[in-house]
Image: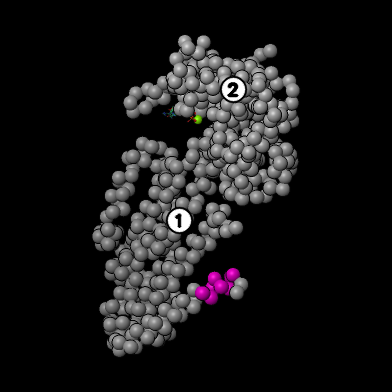
Amino acid sequence: MNGRLRNVIVPLFAMLVFLLLWEALVWVNDWPNYKMASPSDLWPAYVRYWELFLVMGWQTLWRTVVGLLLAVIVGIAIGMVMGFSRTMRDALYPLLVGFNAVPKATVVPIVALMFVGAHDFNTVLIAFMISFFPIAVSVSIGLSTLEPEYRDILRSLGASQTTIFWKIALPKTLPEFFGALKVSVTLAFIGTNLMEIVSPHGRGLGALFDSGKTNSDYPLMFAVLIALALLGIVLYYIVVGLEKIFAGWAERTPS
Amino acid sequence: MTALIEIKGVRHAYPTAAGPLPVLDGLELSVEEGGFCAVVGPSGCGKSTLTRLIAGLMRPDEGEVWLHGERVRGPRSTVGMAFQNPVLLEWRSILKNVMLPLEIVPNGLKGEAAKERARHLLSLVGLEGFEDKRPSELSGGMRQRASLCRALVHQPEVLILDEPFGALDAFTREDLWQTMHELKAKEPFTGVLITHDLRESIFLGDQVVVLSGRPARTQYVMNIDRSAPANLEELYTTEAAERLTILRHQIEIAQGRVPEEVAS
Ligand SMILES: Nc1ncnc2c1ncn2[C@@H]1O[C@H](COP(=O)(O)OP(=O)(O)OP(=O)(O)O)[C@@H](O)[C@H]1O
Ligand SMILES: [Mg+2]
């Protein structure tokens, strides 16, 4: 089988098997809808609410992406500061760890109260807060573990710190950065949904889930879960694609 | 003749948690233009520190470092460096790696001329046909060859080599010694080579400097006449054996295993 086709068919097949097993599990146990909906129950939900799914899906998507972009910018900035200065690393690290350790589920209602009504802002903020940590840490580690010889090669020629950053430090950190971005993209997505579910009159797939809950529309809830999973997969693979483009060199070709 | 590299009474200490660690104390070194100075000394005595001083990457606490009649106060683009770790950039092809210094130094060759220069050097070290390969596709010896090309591409006055062959197997190392001689014949440079291999020091250097244990001072200087073209057979003559005996003895003194009085 040709490689590319195989890369598509194998995961699709796995997904199909998963859906079939799920269907069979519900069928064999004869579970009612409110215990566990089966894939065949989801279809009507999608047909009925497809417009809502598109609108809400878009809401969730753009807020996740904006939150993630913010996390990338701030994360890289913090990572650079910590990567280049020992003092800053010692100073900021405990703060960051503490910040990251606070369960975001507790921050969500606080943020929701702090900026009442600013739903988009709140959602983006939570997506950002939950996802910048891995990026900051990976960039700082990537920069601070740069072997001194790399720096010396350029520094001995009179290169400035900025040149060293662009020519060596940044590209060398990219593999770590993308590793972190893969974690962050999922985290940002979780952040967005947390806020959407918790906020009253929220928007996005999280809000759709919440309305399914209030209306006891169990198939809708499951349908949202699946839609979230799909969106998560898409986002993740976009990052993988970017990684291939910008840090593909780090992948050793098997020889 | 004036010396191209001149180091006078250099003292240096690193600040550490346990107070200053003196690394160099009373270091003297003088290398003539076109000369090649091999520096040997006990492990951790301050050899790499010496290279960083010559490259202008740091300034000594005391004493002077002169390059071409100018006091070294900071990095200068007339220096080329290579280390034990070839530190090639994995995201660049071999050719682009070699061209790196040309992107940094002022008035470096650009465009096609830069490529031509890099290709020429690569062919000198026997890496023709590997220009478009990634560093990970090359063997350790080949990577070190590429790293040498990168150190020479901008035609530096001074080539600083810090144990560049230290991690290679014996055969590859001897190959690279020959390559060094070929390069020297075609690319004029003044060199300082840090090594822990005494055979390497007498085969490549026209001057071998033995440093004492830390804090390092210049303990012994041996001059070697290099009029005849180098040949590996040289290493098996009685003359070479005598030189090695002397140097080995000096190293033992530097390591503190033999008291100095007994030696002299
Ligand atoms: N930046 C630094 N700060 C503190 N101590 C240092 C620093 N760099 C080197 N040293 C110490 O100074 C001493 C000399 O270091 P240097 O690297 O110059 O030795 P070397 O002769 O090159 O050693 P080797 O044979 O291992 O290459 C060592 O004991 C080392 O631990
Ligand atoms: Mg060293």
Q: Position of residue A205 (x, y in %)?
A: 37, 72
A56 displayed left or right of B162: left
Q: Quadrant of ligand 1?
A: top left
Mark 2, residue position: B244
**Amino acid type of the residue tagged 1 in the rendering:** Gly
Q: Quadrant of residue B207?
A: top right
Q: Quadrant of residue B16?
A: top left
- Determine if the magenta segment contains residue B222: no
A55 displayed left or right of B247: left
Q: Which residues are magenta?
A: A3-10
Q: Nearer the viewer, residue A165 or A74?
A: A165
Give the residue displayed 31% in from the left and 77% down from the top. Answer: A211
Q: Quadrant of residue B186?
A: top right
Q: Quick check: B197 above or below A189? A: above
State the quadrant of the N terminus of chain A.
bottom right
Mark 1, residue position: A179
Dot in front, 2 or 1:
2
